[in-house]
Amino acid sequence: MAKPKLALIPATQGSKLYSVLPADGVGDFNFSRNTVATRINKDGLIETVAVGKSRLNYPLIDGVVNGCPSHLLEPSRTNLITYSNNFDGTNMINSAIITEFNTTETLSPEGINNASKLTANSAFQRYSFFPTAGDNVDVSCSVFAKKGSASIFSTLIIDKSGQPISTKFDLLNGVIVEGGGSIEDYGNGWYKCSFSGSTSSGATALQIRPFSHGSGFENGWTGSNYIYGFGASLEQGSYATSYIPTSGSTVTRSAETANGAGDASTFNDSEGVLMAEISALTNSGGKWISLSNGSTSQRISFANENGNIRVYIFNGVVIWDYIYYNINTITSNKISLKYKSGDYSLFINGFKINTSTSSLVASGIDSLQFNSGGGSGNFEGNTKQIQYFDTALNDSDLETITSWTSFTDMANGQTYSIK
């Protein structure tokens, strides 16, 4: 099989996304983020990354780092909670929670003693933050929690009209028992508990309520139950993103972009293959990876788009526009797009999905970008690898570069647990 002309394998954090090929640095992606951000490091701990420095985010499977890191690119988000980790009782609705701040009983997901022990001392206990969100908007809550004597806890977003959006989490078994959302194992008993909803008249409170296993909202709440809490966030958006720490005011993490890899000598207008192993942050919107001339007038591209994978090739007229439906774009997928006059094909996870015999080709290709080709539709998600070949590979080679070497490799690559 031919050697790739450009290859990105996430291995180094810095001011660029560094490609191992070509060796002269022409294949490096320009990277931008104007604020600090957090990531999961190689030890499975939450870590702050400096302004302008890319993030290598390590995958957690059953709370343990398993597999190689990805470059993480996220949109701009603001944590509306002004004290994300201030569980010291100053923001409580009532005095029904006793808080031990910076407890020494457990390490937080950052690996230090900055978590809080939240103990109920009455039958009706709740700890509340007071963020402000707009009217009729999507909001997403996330908080890290660990079981203590209580193994069930609920989180609620209350809007101005008093309507709750809630989810109940089981920290003993790591599952959701009421409502929607997600629960992610961060190891050492910690779970990131997230859920989303829409406010009719603005969010005014985020409540955390610990109670014993099996009890409900209406009864069974008893005093002296406790859980551990860390890192609360409320974001205006349809899904929760990586943790944004705050300490007295709201904090915005700026959007991340990566573009401009390669030059005219790197790419072949007449034929080639663009391959990526990627996962989306959400099954909505269109998030692109493209070969282009710096605009959308000449582009060879594919996207995670609304829970589907879309191919779009254009040179002033549409050359090929195809959508592959019913695929989970949030898990990692290996995608290869071959282009050549009369011989286009799309491979996903080892299978040939579709072909085109269009005789048209794009021209003037001089860059590889994490967007639609002209700066819009920025890719948001995790990237495990990018490869570009300046020749059209045969089907056997395309099957090889989009397949996994074993069942275990596939499961780990898609962050599935093997039980």
Image (tube, rainbow, N blue to C red):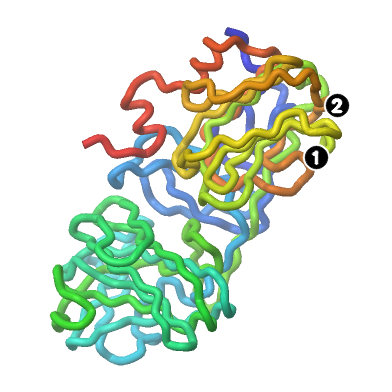
Image mark count: 2
Give the crowd class for mark 1: few <14, some 14-19, many >=20 residues within 10 Å: many
Q: Position of residue 300 (x, y in %)?
A: 73, 30
Which secondary structure, mark 1?
Answer: loop
Give the amino acid type for the residue marked by disc 2 in the picture. Answer: Gly
- Mark-to-mark CA distance, 2 and 1: 12 Å
Quarter of the image containing the N terminus?
top right
30 horizontally vs 282: left or right: right
Q: Is residue 244 visible?
A: yes
Q: Residue at the location (67% across, 40% down)?
A: 370
Which secondary structure, mark 2?
Answer: loop
Disc 2 vs disc 1: which is toward the camera? 1
Give the amino acid type for the residue marked by disc 1 in the picture. Answer: Thr
Disc ID at residue 296: 1
In the rendered image, which residue does mark 2 sit on? 364
Front residue of 271 and 223: 271
Q: Position of residue 163 (x, y in %)?
A: 42, 83
Give the crowd class for mark 2: few <14, some 14-19, many >=20 residues within 10 Å: some
